[in-house]
Image: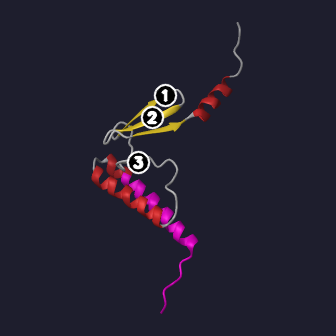
Amino acid sequence: MGRRHVSNKEVKAIARRRVVRLLVLAQQQAGSGNLDRARRYVDLARRVSMRGNVPMPYGASVCRECHTPFLAGRTCRVRLRSAHLTITCLECGGKRRLPYVKEQRELRGCQGPKRTS
C-alpha cells in the first residue's frame, strides 16, 4: 500500500482550520489566565500557517513580539487616536497601530447637512 496523495488545496484547508482552532484555544486560555499555554498555542498556529503556506486570519489579535493573545483590559490596552487605533501589549509593551479612516469617513458621510433653525 502506497501513501495517499493529499492535494495542495486540501493541505491549505486543513492548515486554515487548525490555525483558527489554535487561535480560539489561545483566546480561551488567555481569558482563564494561563498565558504560557496561550502563547504556545499562538506559536503553534504561526508554525502551522507557515508550513501550510496560509496567512494568519485577518484580525488575529496577537502581539507580534511576545505572541500573547490580546484581550482588552487583561493583556492589552486599547486607545483611540485621531486616525488610528493603538493597542499596547501589557506583557512586553509592544505597540500595534491599526488605521480606522474608513469608519471616520462613513460617520462623516452619514451625518448629512446641518440644519439651521
In the rendered structure, find residue 64 and report the number of the disc placed on it: 3
Q: Amino acid at mark 3?
A: Arg
Q: Write the residue at 52% across / 61% down.
A: 54
Q: Image check: 61 left or right of 68?
A: right
- Mark 1 Cα-neighbour bin, 10 Å: few <14, some 14–19, many ≥20: few
- Mark 2 Cα-neighbour bin, 10 Å: few <14, some 14–19, many ≥20: some
Magenta highlight on residue 24: yes
Q: Amino acid at mark 2?
A: Thr
- The percent position of residue 83, horizontal first and vertical second, equals 54, 30
Q: Residue furthest bottom?
A: 1
Q: Work out whether 38 lies above or below 84.
A: below
> Distance between the Cα atoms at labels 3 and 1?
21 Å
- Mark 3 Cα-neighbour bin, 10 Å: few <14, some 14–19, many ≥20: few
Mark 1: which secondary structure?
loop
Q: What is the tally of numbered marks visible in this picture?
A: 3
Q: Which quadrant would the C terminus be assigned to in this image? A: top right
Q: Are marks 1 and 2 in contact (CB under 8 Å)?
A: yes
In the rendered structure, find residue 86 and report the number of the disc placed on it: 2
Pointer 2 or 3: first along the chain = 3
Q: Write the residue at 53% across / 67% down.
A: 12
Q: Which residues are magenta?
A: 1-26
> Distance between the Cα atoms at labels 1 and 2?
7 Å
Q: Write the residue at 37% across / 53% down.
A: 26
